[in-house]
Amino acid sequence: MAEASRWHLGTPKRKLRYREDVEIRTTLQELLLYSIFLINLCILTFGMVNPHMYYLNKVMSSLFLDTSVAGEERTNFKSIRSITDFWKFMEGPFLDGLYWDSWYNNEKLYDLKNSSRIYYENILLGLPRVRQLKVRNGTCKVYSFFRSLMDECYDKYTSKNEDMADFGLKQDTEWKYSSPGMNSPWHWGFVGVYQNGGYIFTLSKSKSETLNKFINLRMNSWITRGTRVIFIDFSVYNANVNLFCIIRLVAEFPATGGILTSWQFYSVKLLRYVSFYDYFIASCEIIFCIFIIVFAIQEIKKLKEFKFAYFKSIWNWLELLLLVLCFLTVFFSSYSNMQIYRMLGQLLRDTEKYSDFYFLAYWHIYYNNIIAITIFFAWIKIFKFISFNKTMSQLSSTLSRCIKDIIGFAIMFFIIFFAYAQLGFLVFGSQVDDFSTFQNAIFTQFRIVLGDFNFAGIQQANRILGPIYFITFVFFVFFVLLNMFLAIINDTYSEVKADYSIGRRPDFQLGKMIKKSYNNALEKLKLKKPETDEDKERMENKDLAEKARREGFDEKEIQSAEQMKKWKERLEKKYYSTEIQDDYQTVTQQEFRDLFLYAVELEKELHYVSLKLNRVMKKVSALQY
């Protein structure tokens, strides 16, 4: 009997303690390894980003977008609205920005070597290129009542409507159609998606020759009614910061008339391994690949061990997603480097042609986007290691409990939200830019929820429906639905916190694990005196008392619980100790008195718990009826 009691009270505790120690050790090892991986990934990503990228984009955009035509302060690339304004920009600010052939006092400071240096520091690579895409006449139908007024009709741009016939003077390349390249990416504009190719001409290295070319094109109507988009492409290189800036200015000619302008400025580091710091980044890339292989092997072992049960954990899904993103990062990096080394020398050797660096920048931007998403999810994975913390455990329990309520709420929310979005699009779409498309209407309503809205524009578009739409949307979405969402979260969090307060969840925190390992390390290095059992017991009692006070227990209840704990430990030590050999022992009067008081206190606690349960059952019964 005594042997069974000793086994029952001793062995499971030792097993539980051993299991916790193993879990602590394993978690700390994984956290340490993953911290090294995360630090390496941060060094790798931040080493690719140069603060000068922003400043290079800024100075180039201010030069080509904000510089106005001489004598017309309001006419720059951003404000172009007609073909006349477009040619004024091309013959004025654009040419002045491209060709910097002398110092500010008209002296030649250095040998230009048959090239232009924008802002004296940025070398123009190759020759700039201008190309346009057109649509054929008759691609749309004119209503019969209006055929007597117009016999031409040019639809919006599509690959089927594209005009590929020679036109105008038909003697130079700018009047002849050029087929698009195989690897050239398409461009997504405001009113269409445009492929490569079209009617192309390259500028000259001489400013005067280029000006004469523009005048010739303008006088011979190079831009026609069928023109749908014009691209201006060129690239510069700044050796001071080892950055390429690939620039594309776009002027779209929608079927409604007028011009819509847009632009792209990509500052990228195509020459990646130049300085010693670059080679340090290369070593980080190698370490990154090693980590990927190690993590992949670990996940394969887990998958073989747990099989289908492996996919029941959300953290395992996050591990798989992170591995996929890491492999995509390696693929994009390898492909981007291959294309750079294959094409960069070829583009730099021939300075008398247009150098298509846009293709290289396109893949480099994709690589940056993938690695940005990768490091985002890499930081999210940190929650896996701090999920043992009480606060994080409460948060995850709250979200898991209320997920069904949130899904039901989300269905109701988006029904109302999309109903208002369609209403706003149909009522204000033709007059307010924020509601010009259904997608814009959706994001505009999210902005209204955050407090960013243009009530004056809505009211001006419709004096009656505008205020009604705004007031009812704010009332139902902001005051009703969002508060319902918060109520669901708060109510569930209160239930989870109540469960934790009565000990339904293990108090297993990462902070305690790290503190324990830290103290053990100091004791082994003899930098700290080892704690005795009495010190540990005193600190544990102190922590429990502080926790009880935070949970709202009074001092009398805390003292009673401490007394109960002392009695229990003393009795377990006396009657279940491994040193006792005899199963039958005499009980002294003092021991009997202690046992009696212990039984009385247990009876009080059981009576107190019974009263609490009766109150809870009464409340549950009242809620049911």
Image (cartoon, rainbow, N blue to C red):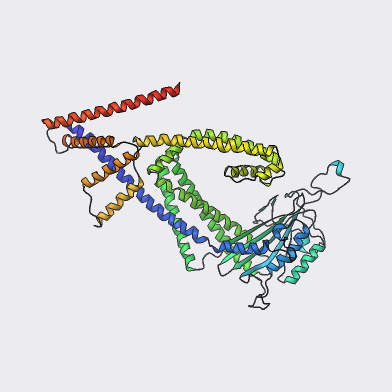
Quadrant housing the N terminus: top left
Indicate left or right for 310 with 572 as reference: right
In the image, residue 299 above or below residue 565: below
Is 184 rendered above or below residue 209?
above
Residue 542: horizontal and vertical position, in percent?
Answer: 27, 43
Please report the residue visible at 44 percent of the width from the left and 35 percent of the height from the top. 492
In the displayed structure, would residue 599 be above or below residue 10? above
Q: Is residue 605 left or right of residue 284?
A: left
Location of residue 459 in the rendering, given as x and y in whole percent from the top left corner: 69, 42
Residue 355, x across and y down, in percent:
65, 65
Near-viewer residue (220 or 594): 594
Residue farthest along the top direction in this orientation:
625
Displayed quadrant of residue 210: bottom right
Report which quarter residue 315 is drawn in.
Answer: top left
Between residues 442 and 345, which one lies in front from this camera angle?
A: 442
Q: Residue furthest right?
A: 148
- State whether residue 346 appears in this view: no
**Is residue 218 shown above or below 392?**
below
